[in-house]
Image: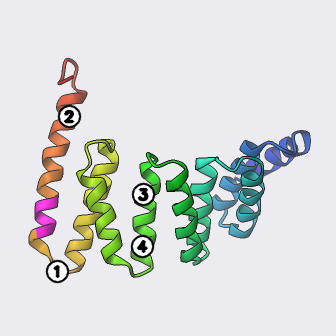
Amino acid sequence: AEEALVVLAELRRLEPHNALTMTMAADANVALRRFHAAFDDLRQALAVEPNDVYARHLLAGVYQSMGELDLAAAELAKLRQQQPRYHAGWLAAAEVDLLRGREREAEQQLLAIASSVEVPARHRITAGLDLAWLYRARGRFRAAERVLDSLRREDGAEKVRAAPGGAR
C-alpha cells in the first residue's frame, strides 16, 4: 500500500481533480489504517464527484473505523438515497445499526434484504447469516435455525441456476 501511495501521489500531481485517484489513495490509506488521511482523500473525491457510490461507502467505513457511528450512518443514509439498489450499502447500514445498539432496526433491514427476490443472492445470504447471528446472540435459537434452513434452500437454488443448463 505504501508503494501504491507513491504512485498515486504522482498521478494526483498530474491530474489533481481525478476523483478515482483520490479514492484509490483513500483505499490504500485504509489498508494502512491511516483513517484521517483516507478521510481527507474521500472528502476531496466526493467534492469532485458527489455521486461516487464507492467513495461514499468507503467514507462510511472510515467513519465506522474511527468510532464515528452516527456519521457513518448518515453517509450510508445518503448512499441509500443516491443509489437505492446498492445492496452492500443496506448491509453496511444494518451493521452500523447493530454497533449503535439499534438491534431492532438492524433486524428489520436484514429481514428486508434476506427476503427480497430483487436482491442478489450473495447479499440475501449475507443478510441471512447476519440475521441468524443476531437471533443466536439474543437466545432465539429456533428463529436462527429457520433462517439457516432458508439459506440452505437458497444455496441449493443458486447452485441449480449456476449449473450449465440450469434453471433460466
Give the labeled residue for mark 1.
139
Up-down relation of residue 48 to residue 107 (above or below): above
Task: Mark 2 or mark 4: name the one nearer the start of the chain.
Answer: 4
- Is 89 displayed left or right of 6 in the figure? left
Give the labeled residue for mark 2.
159
Task: Mark 3 or mark 1: name the one nearer the start of the chain.
Answer: 3
- Is 7 displayed left or right of 165 in the figure? right
- Going 65% across and 53% down the picture, which residue do you hit? 27
Q: Quadrant of the C terminus?
A: top left
Callout 4: SS = helix
Between 134 and 3, the residue placed more toward the observer is 134
Up-down relation of residue 55 to residue 76 (above or below): above
The reply to whether residue 85 is in sight is yes
Up-down relation of residue 5 to residue 35 (above or below): above
**Label for residue 90?**
3
Between 82 and 65, the residue placed more toward the observer is 82
Callout 3: SS = helix
Between 79 and 42, the residue placed more toward the observer is 79
Q: Separation of disc 3 and disc 1 at Cα?
A: 25 Å
**In x, y percent, where is residue 82?**
55, 50
**In x, y percent, where is residue 38?**
71, 61
Q: Separation of disc 1 and disc 2 at Cα?
A: 31 Å
